Image (cartoon, grey):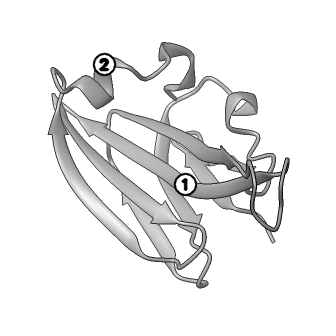
Amino acid sequence: MNLYVIFFKDNTNFYGGDYKNPKWLEIPDKPIKSISYLTPLGRWIQLRDYDKYYHFIEVAMDLNGKKKGQKILEYSYLIAKKDNIYKVHKVSLQTGKIEIQHLKEEDKFIKQLNPIGWR
């Protein structure tokens, strides 16, 4: 199953990958109408009519636990921008819990995002 589906304003779709390879940077450069994003518990996050969208996966490295030397997928972030407000969905890939924050453009978290990830 795909991690997300993007519906473009020209009535075409793009199907994302998975948590290990979300294919976010492969999204065509055209206006997005909406995004449907699948969480680990099988719930969908629906985002529509935002100016821009951003996605990334936070990964940790197990240094001395059971999975020593392995990458552990911790959180998935899906961010939607409208004017100068950013709605941030932080999804725990371990528990499925979703935290939502509303941040402004001048927030340090937003400023540190790599600009190439905006769609």
Q: In the image, is residue 77 above or below residue 85?
A: below
Q: Residue at x 58, y 51 (%)?
A: 7
Residue 97 appears at what percent x and percent y?
43, 76
- The residue that label 1 is drawn on is 76
53 or 88: nearer the viewer: 88
- The residue that label 2 is drawn on is 111
Is 59 positioned to the left or the right of 37 in the image?
right
> Dot 2 lies on which element?
helix
Residue 59 appears at what percent x and percent y?
65, 46
Q: Residue at x 30, y 27 (%)?
A: 110
Q: Residue at x 78, y 57 (%)?
A: 18
How many numbered badges does the structure rendering display?
Answer: 2
Q: Say what amino acid the circle numbered 1 marks.
A: Ser
Q: In the image, is residue 91 above or below residue 44?
A: above
User: Reading the chain from its start, which is encountered first: label 2 or label 1?
Assistant: 1
Q: Say what amino acid the circle numbered 2 marks.
A: Lys
Residue 4 appears at what percent x and percent y?
65, 59
